Image (cartoon, rainbow, N blue to C red):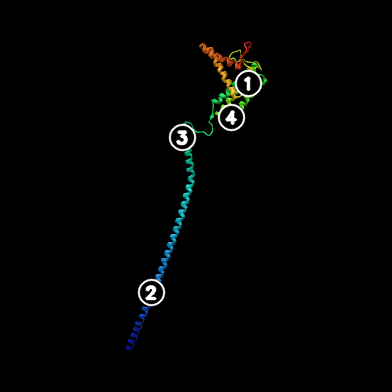
Amino acid sequence: MGTIRMMASALVIGLGLCALPALAEGEAAQAPAAKGKAHTEKAKAGNERKGKAAGDNAAAKDAGAKRAEKGAAHEGKGAAAQAPAREGKGAGNKGEGRAARTERRTGKTEAAVPPPVLGDAQTRIDKRQEYQTRRIEGGVKRGSLTPDELAKLQSQQKAIADMEAQFAGDGALTKEEVASLRRALNDASLQIWTEKRDTDGVQQPVVRLGKDIFLSDATAARLESPDLTRQEARAFTRDFARTLELRRQLATENLPEDQRATLEAEYNDLLTKYFVVKATVTTTAG
């Protein structure tokens, strides 16, 4: 019985010893497989991490590109918005600089339109119109204006008033408009003066030259003609002013004989050119 147990123990031990190489071989065979499997899984995980990192990098690059594009667009938009302002400001500064330089150089500011003339000029024009109206009324009272002459002069005055009203429609008169009104008033003044001294009505003498001095028919006809030029009117006005000045010098100044003779000759030439002496005619001056 003891021998049987010893044989059984030896068999178990033998079987165990025989199984050890196989077990060790299985374990050895399984170790590379496990190691390969671990290596595969590790490589797979590494690839996954690399792929994820690459994806993250790509996403980051894409996000960065989008941010850069958005920033560029915003910067371009800002630059585009600021460019007109800078350009307008620059143009304004350029124009302002030119105006300032002109003002410093000439003492005058630039103007797109002529500056208006206010106050005094228009007041003087209105006063001249009122005075001419009174001169016409005086001619009617003295009988030196006929109905036809009166109608002509009144029509002329109305045309001047209409001209002034048109010019002053914007609230002021420019220098050019004032000059036009003055020319019209000068023409009207000469016509009033002439109509009162022609022979159509009671002829008035040229009292500034003398109560016996009258306008000649030829001079009156020319001054009343619609063909009278502005140069002719100015020439008569200038000669009349010179005649008055000569008369003043001859009447008030103590002149040497030769100078007096020269002035008298000039005075008589002008007098006979435009006027006549009618010593027998007496009338009331006006």
Q: Is residue 70 or residue 28 the one in the foreground?
A: 70
Give SS at disc 1.
helix
Residue at image coords 42%, 66%? 47
Q: Nearer the viewer, residue 155 or 23?
A: 155
Q: Name the residue type under label 1.
A: Arg
Label for residue 32? 2
Residue at 62% x, 26% y: name it: 159
Quadrant including the C terminus: top right
Instruction: Compute the Cα span from label 2 to label 4.
Output: 116 Å
| Residue on which the image places disc 3 | 101
N-terminal label among 4 and 1:
4
Disc 4 residue type (three-letter): Phe
Residue identified by numbered label 1: 222
Image location (x, y in percent) of residue 48 = 43, 65
Ranked by sequence position, the earlier of labels 4 and 3 is 3
Question: Nearest the camera: 133 or 201?
Answer: 201
Instruction: Please tell me how crowded label 4 is: few (under 14), some (14-19), or many (20+) other residues with Cα within 10 Å.
Output: some
Give the quadrant of residue 118.
top right
- Report whether 2 appears left or right of 107: left
Please name the residue that numbered disc 4 is placed on: 167
**What residue is drawn where x is 46% and y is 51%?**
72
- Helix, strand or loop under label 4: helix
Mark 2 vs mark 3: give the one in front: 3
Q: Earlier in the sequence, mark 2 or mark 3?
A: 2
4 vs 3, front mark:
3
Q: Amino acid at mark 3?
A: Arg
Which residue type does callout 2 highlight? Answer: Pro
Which badge, 1 or 2, comes first in the chain's sequence? 2
Q: Is residue 91 above or below residue 248?
A: below
Label 3 neighbour load within 10 Å: few <14, some 14-19, many 20+: few
